[in-house]
Amino acid sequence: MEEMLGEEWRKAIPESRDQRQSRALVWMLGTILAGLCGEIAWRVAGHGGGRFAAVALAVSAGFVLLVRRLRAATWGGAVCGGMICLLLTFWTGLNRTGAGGGSVAQSGLTPLALLFVMTFLATRAGRQKKARAGLAEARRGRNAAQVIANLSVAGVCVALGLGWVGRVMGLAALVEATADTVSSEIGQAFGGEPMMLTTLRRVAPGTDGAVTAMGTAAGVLAGAVVAAVGMWALGISWGSSGVAWAAGVLGLLFDSVLGATVERRGWVGNDLVNFASTVFAALVAGILSGGKF
């Protein structure tokens, strides 16, 4: 679930610990993302795939500006999103139209853009109701830690040279991130009283690990759309797309279990839970794909 916002800190984890965990996540994954993007910048200088690398850089810069224009993220969040966009666009679109060429449309940019649109709309759905309950996202948008927690795994997976398995793993991470955000936002706005998966008891909206039938259904459906579009964009089979969707749904359930246990006990914060859930979805996709790394 997205972090609850209000005048007072309302999470089980102490605020200082939560901030330390989020900063550590940003520094660790941000450094990895910057290093991976550095290789693409090196290619722009004429070391292979330079033309498409330049196109991918331009598209990613435009993505950063659009995100900021819509106030969907802070500058830090937008820049992190731009690096992830660059990795997804370049490594999945390179050589899709012949030697040295690439396709922006048939790349990870397309499912990423779809994720952005659906989560953007879901976040704003029923905003006044969520604001009254102290559950609405900050108007400044998602910060760097939130963006990295949800999307960095997808970018890293496609950049590791794992071939089609890496694309399936990256798509599974995008499916999980979409399903998690949409289920949380729609559930909080329209789902009514949620239930804990671990106890099957009704709890207050916004409780860590709580789910609603409407929210879960919306998240699963949104994930299916991303998986289906990702099949075409990433050049994978229906079977691989189904694996990505199934792994993403399992990651969504894993997120709720973590929320109901370790997050509710105050051991970890929401960003680490979201990051762990995308890692889980990607690993499950890799295993279901035959582990051909």
Image (cartoon, grey):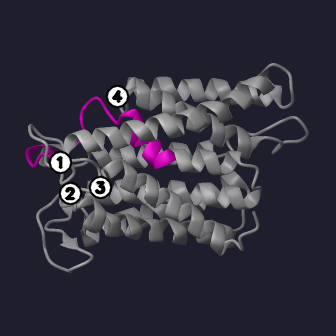
Instruction: Give the residue number, with chain letter if any, for mark 2.
Output: 188
Mark positioned earlier in the residue sequence (1 or 2): 1
Q: Which residue lies most toward the bottom here? A: 200
Disc 1 is placed on an element classified as loop
Mark 4 neighbour density, 10 Å: few (under 14) some (14–19) many (20 or more):
some
Mark positioned earlier in the residue sequence (4 or 2): 4
Instruction: Give the residue number, with chain letter if any, for mark 4.
Output: 71
Mark nearer the viewer, 2 or 3: 3
Q: Position of residue 184 (x, y in %)?
A: 29, 57
How far apart are the two marked residues, 2 and 3, measured between alpha carbons?
A: 9 Å
Instruction: Give the residue number, with chain letter if any, for mark 3.
Output: 1
Mark positioned earlier in the residue sequence (1 or 3): 3
Q: Position of residue 174 (x, y in %)?
A: 52, 54
Q: Quadrant of residue 134?
A: top left
Mark nearer the viewer, 4 or 3: 3
Mark positioned earlier in the residue sequence (4 or 3): 3
Identify the residue at image location x=57%, y=61%. Answer: 282
Question: What amino acid does circle 3 point to?
Answer: Met
How far apart are the two marked residues, 4 and 2, measured between alpha carbons?
A: 21 Å
Question: What amino acid does circle 1 point to?
Answer: Leu
Q: Are marks 2 and 3 in contact (CB under 8 Å)?
A: yes
Instruction: Give the residue number, with chain letter if any, for mark 1.
Output: 135
Q: Are marks 1 and 3 in contact (CB under 8 Å)?
A: no
Mark positioned earlier in the residue sequence (1 or 4): 4
